[in-house]
Amino acid sequence: MTDDALFTRVDQLLTTQLQGVLATQQHSHPYTSLMAFAHTPDLRYLVIATLRETQKHANLMRNAEVSFLVDNRTNAQIDYEQAVAISVIGHARAIPEADLGQFLAIYANKHPKLEDFINAPACSLLRIEVSSYRVISKFQAVEVLERWARRPVPRHRR
């Protein structure tokens, strides 16, 4: 599949799903949380919201590296052939004040029932800067979209 086709496939799944599973690290152990999310049209960021006094927020402040799983399974046998899962790899960070309005709008547009939650003083809106999307379909076929992967800058010899 071309990168453009894979981009479209990722965008469509992220658009149709409301929630995913955030994986963080609590010390040396994985910690998962079901989260509502939104994404930017360029797929560069996912947007999540959590209360500051939660374990997941504490984990994110200690280690920003995350994985976020989104899928369209129906919990039926047909899922082995038709379900698609996307494992998003990236870094979660606080949103700079200058960009906060834009990300709040993206999140609130997808989750209007959570508007009071995201505007609460105890809530923290975060963005996951995506380094790659791993798209799994037909149970074990894997495709990778790494449009924003951080690559080392080549060093030129003098």
Image (cartoon, helix red, strand yellow):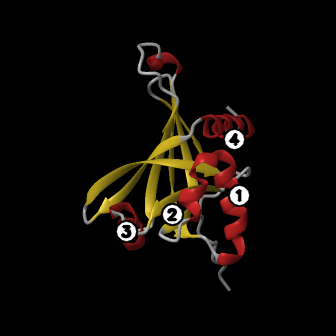
Residue closer to the observer: 76 or 157: 76
Please tell me whether residue 75 is drawn above or below residue 64 in the rendered image. above
Callout 4: SS: helix
Q: Which residue is mark 3?
A: 53
Q: Residue at x 44, y 27 (%)?
A: 140
Say which amino acid is labelled 4. Answer: Phe
Mark 2 residue type: His
Q: Residue furthest bottom?
A: 158
**Mark closest to the chain's N terminus, 1 or 3:** 3
| Residue 149 found in image quarter | bottom right
Does residue 155 appear to the left or right of 64 in the view shown?
right
Disc 3 secondary structure class:
loop
**Residue situated in front as seen by the camera: 57 or 144:** 57
Label 2: how many residues lie within 10 Å, few (<14), some (14-19) or many (20+)?
some
The residue located at (47%, 69%) in the rendering is: 122
Q: Which residue is mark 4?
A: 7
| Residue wearing tag 1 | 105
Point out the tag, 2 or 4, that comes first from the N-terminus. Answer: 4
Q: Give x and y (percent) for residue 59.
A: 36, 66
Residue linked to disc 2:
91
Work out how far the residue at label 3 is from the one at label 2, CA to CA, in angstroms: 20 Å
* Helix, strand or loop status at disc 2: strand
Q: Residue at x 64, y 57 (%)?
A: 148
